[in-house]
Amino acid sequence: MAIVDLVMPKMGESIMEATVLKWHKHVGDHVKMDETLLDIATDKVDSEVPSTTAGVITELLYKENDVVPVGAVIARVDAGGAAAAAAPVAAPVQQAAAPAPVQAAAQQYQPAPVVENSGARFYSPLVLNIAGTEGIGMAELENIPGTGNEGRVTKKDILDYVSRRKLQPQAAPQAAAPQPAPVAAPQPAPQPAVSAPAPSSAVIGGNVEIIEMDRMRRLIADHMVRSKATSPHVTSFTEADVTNIVKWRDKVKGKFEQMYGEKITYTPIFFEAIVNCIRKFPMINSSLDGNNIIIKKDINIGMATALPSGNLIVPVIKNAGTKNLLGLTKDVNALANAARGNKLKADDTQGGTFTVTNVGTFGSLMGTPIINQPQVAILAVGAIKKRPVVLETEDGDVIAIRHMMYLSLSYDHRIVDGSLGASFLTAVAKELEAFDKNMEI
């Protein structure tokens, strides 16, 4: 028998673990090279993992909903040709022995020496955010055992630790309960009281439909609540006359698509202006680590995108500061199409340093967006509307019909003061208004 180990693939520089969503193959099943073996999830993106060999599945080392570190062996395949055909006979034995491989795999990726090297451990922004929300200091964080790659503390590790810590104060009352135990036995009344959710659902009443949140919506909800708990949000507003942009796009969009095979939207034009202003106000492109402000030299723009399911995802245009309008257009279109087709890769949503959300897509004039942690600011652009506006001319003030758009910037007041936030927002508006409507493509 030629047994081949299949491992959890690396899906991005900062992605150290993934959750098993669904196994498409089971012990005893034949699998072809590059055939989908399982579905996995990393934060928001779901991905398919293909088999790297052909043969018969002999072991599955993780169950659905297990969190698996990158590089861990997830399954074993007998690629021994004829010998593989006998593998299904061993399936019952595998079922009985299934817990053992899972335990072995868990031990293999929980290296004890990590504690000695704890001072040099890397902590992801998500882990640090959870630690900050739960009041876990760095000294306490250093003592949490990590099951991630190279002993890193994963989201599951810290959430398990938080759960155990919250249960500790409740252990004392239960320890003192041996004496009243006989008294508690004949009192079944407290048992129904625990099922308080049932009365609460009854209170809803009326003609309703109750829908359980899917996994992505739960992640979004958790991320939004944690962002509000982490950052004191302040939102500033301004408006911009984008008439020149509207006229230029209307004039060149047909020729632009003929020349480059890409549809030009407003989004890359906005991104180009935002990048220019981030260069003038680099503090907007930063994050906070304890008492240290980390200013990011690379400008990676996240663009909030609605999925067909109604959920929201934020793919990231990497190194946006190095790209011209055509380059930004290609990236915007590619990521938007991948998002709509559920084809985004895990790395496509990582590494953002500033986020833009277009609430105008859905007809909103403006919004108060929530910061995408660990960033410190997010810009919302509203719907473009024609309005009568007073213009100053050499011959005096005139009223003209202009294309106007509201801009709103939410920022972390721990780092970004009102003067900086308002100055950056005003600069973006002026950059948009100064767009050259005669620019050649």
Image (cartoon, rainbow, N blue to C red):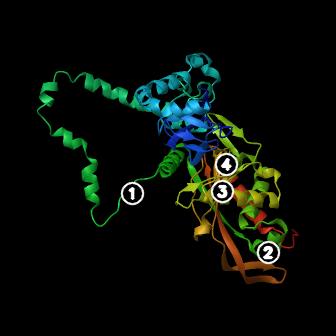
**Percent of width and height locating residue 235:** 60, 56
**Percent of width and height locating residue 373:** 60, 45
- SS of the residue under disc 1: loop
Q: Amino acid at mark 4?
A: Asp
Looking at marks 3 and 2 on the same chain, the residue that comes earlier in the sequence is marked by 2
Q: Nearer the viewer, mark 4 or mark 3?
A: 3
Looking at marks 4 and 3 on the same chain, the residue that comes earlier in the sequence is marked by 3
Name the mark on residue 170: none
Q: Amino acid at mark 3?
A: Ala
Residue at mark 1 to residue at mark 4: CA–CA distance: 29 Å
Q: Which residue is mark 4?
A: 348
Residue at mark 4 to residue at mark 2: CA–CA distance: 29 Å
Residue at mark 1 to residue at mark 2: CA–CA distance: 44 Å
| Point 67% across, 40% down: residue | 12
Q: Are marks 4 and 3 in contact (CB under 8 Å)?
A: yes
Q: Which residue is mark 1?
A: 211
Name the mark on residue 338: 3
| Point 71% across, 61% down: residue | 333
Looking at marks 1 and 4 on the same chain, the residue that comes earlier in the sequence is marked by 1
